[in-house]
Image (tube, grey):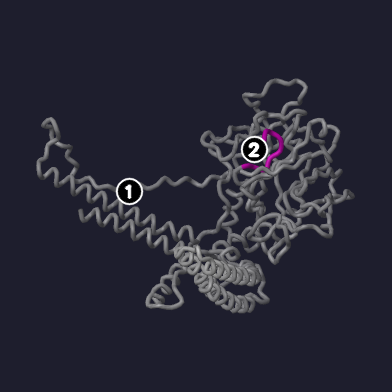
Amino acid sequence: MRRWIAVFAVLALAVLVAAYIALFPLAPQGGALAPLLSRLDDTAANLVVRSGRELAVLTPLALGIILALLLAASARRAGLAAARGGRRRMPGGRKGNRPDPDAVWRPEPEPVEAEMDHVPGLERRAASDGEAGNGTGAPVAAARAPAAPPLMPELDDEPGPNAGPDDSLPPIPGAIVLARKPRERTTSEQAWFDETSWLGGLPRLGTAAWPADERGPLPFAAQLDLAAIAAACPDSPLPRSGSLAFFLGSGAVVEVPGAPELFTEPPPGLPPAFDEGGHPLPAHAGPLSRAFFPFWPVEPLLADRPEHEAPRSEGFTATEPAEHLWWHGAVHLADCLHMAYHGAAHVVATERERGTLAGARLARLEQDPTTSIEDLDEAGEALAACERQLPAIQAEQASLAQVVTAMDGFVADRDPWTALSAEEIAVLGELLAHVQRDCPALVRFYVPETLGELTSLSLRAMMTGDAQAFAQVPEAELARINDQHRLAIGHQHQLFGIGAPRPRHPQAPGGEVLLLQLGCDDMMEWNWAHQGLFQFRLSAGDIAQRRWDRVTLTFLPE
């Protein structure tokens, strides 16, 4: 019995620790428990900064479960031993099963899934099939989608079960995946930016105009070399030369003849493409807003994949605790703190208004003779809570102002691509723990939880930056990104095929063709809302007539 009590005690303690980390800070402004809870808040803040709130919460839970299982196994073995010692018999006169006295329960290690190289198999298959199939060496790959369960719908061109034959419609071209090219040390900056198919960056429109709608210029997403598409997919219905430039917003496709050498200057009024560390296509520009998405060359590959390959299921993250940190990440944190402080005035005003409304409600209830004692008590407690919360928020605002001033001095005149020393990383970690503990209401939606998030942010920027920035990427991280993070997450960047989510019929009336699908891709800062995707579609007849003005752009949430 004692062992079972210990099992429940261990589980309860693990839950309490995890709950404290999830809910900290909990130290009151005063009282006998304030010193103890303040020390616990400091410990929780340091754990969250080092490993992230989610991992910090899960770790004590996992340890508690393991210890509880071990204790439970011990209790069960003791009970069986006692039963065996008493020579108890089962109904029918048969002896009970005797446990092996040497059998000890040991938790089996969870299977570790080997990290998979998602792209080189495509390239190897593309090279072999291209040479064997058409003699041109064009990148053609043939394989099957993952057998079970796929992270994205199969990318094939087979008709669905409800689709009837229609000889008037052209066949659907085989699906083409756009894989981001690896960036190697041997690739010069000039060669990187001279690629003819790419995502993000700026377009090369030549003499064509940058498309716009009534709200202004449209955000640029991709430009694809039509000759490369035709080489990868001989059945492509697109022109065989020039390129197509794709724009988001209300959606537009621009055909660009030839191969212009110069990038087109962004027009006045171009909305921001994304907020660094935040969301794409923000409604308003802020300190973290960037004018266009990262530039990354792509290569077209047939979408069929070997069974051992699959799209990415999660984004790129640096290892925790952070071993590398650059001043780029520290400057980003300073900008986040400025945004949090800028929003603090609104939080204070909102809290003050809540107090005013709570006071007015209490006054109305006091004047109403029919008001119950319970309602008066509830209204009084609400007003008291507002009166306590407002000074606490104002104290956070004052503390955050000091942190912002100190952080501005810390990052002033720093080269963004210089690495921080171990001592400087420790200072930054202490500062992050401080604001999460002392200013939680003001920084919750602005400031990263861990230093590892800053490292991941800088590495993404360095991979697509200039030569100075790219030179600072550690070799291990460069190899990991080039090997494992060249595909989108889940639904792929894709041309032709059925697309995803798969419609009921493989072809819409009029022979609609999937011109381009853009999935979620953290390396491109394409963290689309609801993990959705964008699809450009156009009928086969309009493609033949080059009526790009009839293209439709649709956003499909997951």
Front-most of residues 553 and 259:
553
User: For the residues carrying marks 1 and 2, which lies nearer the camera in this image?
Assistant: 2
Contact (Cβ within 8 Å) of mark 1 with mark 2 = no
Q: Which residues are magenta?
A: 491-500
State left or right for residue 54 relative to residue 478: left
Extreme residue toward the front, this view: 369
Q: Main secondary structure of the magenta part?
A: loop
Counting from the top left corner in percent of width and height, residue 234 is at 75, 31
Counting from the top left corner in percent of width and height, residue 88 is at 11, 40
Secondary structure of residue under mark 2: loop
The amino acid beneath tag 1 is Pro
Decide whether residue 496 is among the magenta residues: yes
Quadrant showing the C terminus: top right
Quarter assignment of residue 533: top right
Question: Up-down: is 93 above or below 553?
Answer: above
Counting from the top left corner in percent of width and height, residue 292 is at 74, 57
The amino acid beneath tag 2 is Ala
Front-most of residues 286 and 293:
286
Residue annotated with mark 2? 500
Residue annotated with mark 1? 107
Front-most of residues 96 and 455:
96
Counting from the top left corner in percent of width and height, residue 98 is at 17, 39
State left or right for residue 25 relative to residue 350: left
Measuring 84% from the left and 46% from the top, which residue is drawn there?
259
How far apart marks 1 and 2 lie (CA) works out to: 40 Å
Q: What's the mark number on residue 27? A: none
> Visible in this render: residue 513?
yes
> Visible in this render: residue 434?
no
State left or right for residue 210 relative to residue 388: right
Question: Up-down: is 178 above or below 94?
Answer: below
